[in-house]
Image: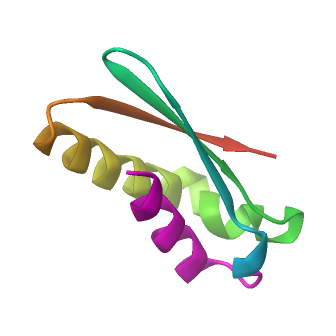
């Protein structure tokens, strides 16, 4: 899951070297934290949060395939 989010995020931003993804694994749920450069934050979130929602949808579909739950947190 971590690699998927990193790949998608690096494709969207202007500074792909500043994308940092960390994963906090729990029993049933994994929390994936995404950090990008301050000027790229809008590109990851998108207008009215549509890009972030799309990334979360892809993440939930991929995590359902492996029978886990994953949550994406975009950190400033």
In the depicted structure, whether residue 7 falls above or below residue 54: below
Which quarter of the figure has residue 58? bottom left
Nearest the viewer among 65 and 41 is 65
Q: Is residue 36 magenta?
A: no
Which quarter of the figure has residue 3? bottom left
Q: Of helix, strand and loop, which mostly describes the magenta segment?
A: helix
| Residue at the image point whose x is 56% and y is 52% from the top | 49
Q: Is residue 12 magenta?
A: yes
Q: Position of residue 12 (x, y in %)?
A: 58, 78
Q: Position of residue 43 (x, y in %)?
A: 66, 70
Q: Position of residue 69 (x, y in %)?
A: 29, 28
| Residue at the image point whose x is 28% and y is 42% from the top | 60
Nearest the viewer among 49 and 5 is 5
Relative side of 3 to 59, left or right: right
Nearest the viewer among 55 and 18 is 18
| Residue at the image point whose x is 62% and y is 63% from the top | 44
Relative side of 49 to 53, left or right: right
| Residue at the image point whose x is 48% and y is 72% from the top | 7
Outermost residue on the right side: it is 38
The magenta stretch is: 1-15
Q: Position of residue 16 (x, y in %)?
A: 69, 79
Nearest the viewer among 44 and 72 is 72
In the depicted structure, whether residue 23 falls above or below residue 24: below
Which quarter of the figure has residue 33? top right
In the depicted structure, whether residue 19 falls above or below residue 48: below
């Amino acid at each position: 899951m971590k690699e998927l989010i990193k790949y998608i995020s690096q494709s969207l931003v202007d500074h792909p070297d500043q994308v940092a993804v960390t994963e906090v694994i729990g029993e049933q749920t994994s929390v994936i934290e995404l950090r990008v450069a301050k000027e790229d934050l809008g590109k990851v979130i998108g207008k009215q949060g549509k890009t972030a929602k799309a990334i979360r949808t892809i993440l939930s579909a991929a995590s359902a395939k492996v029978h886990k739950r994953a949550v994406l947190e975009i950190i400033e």
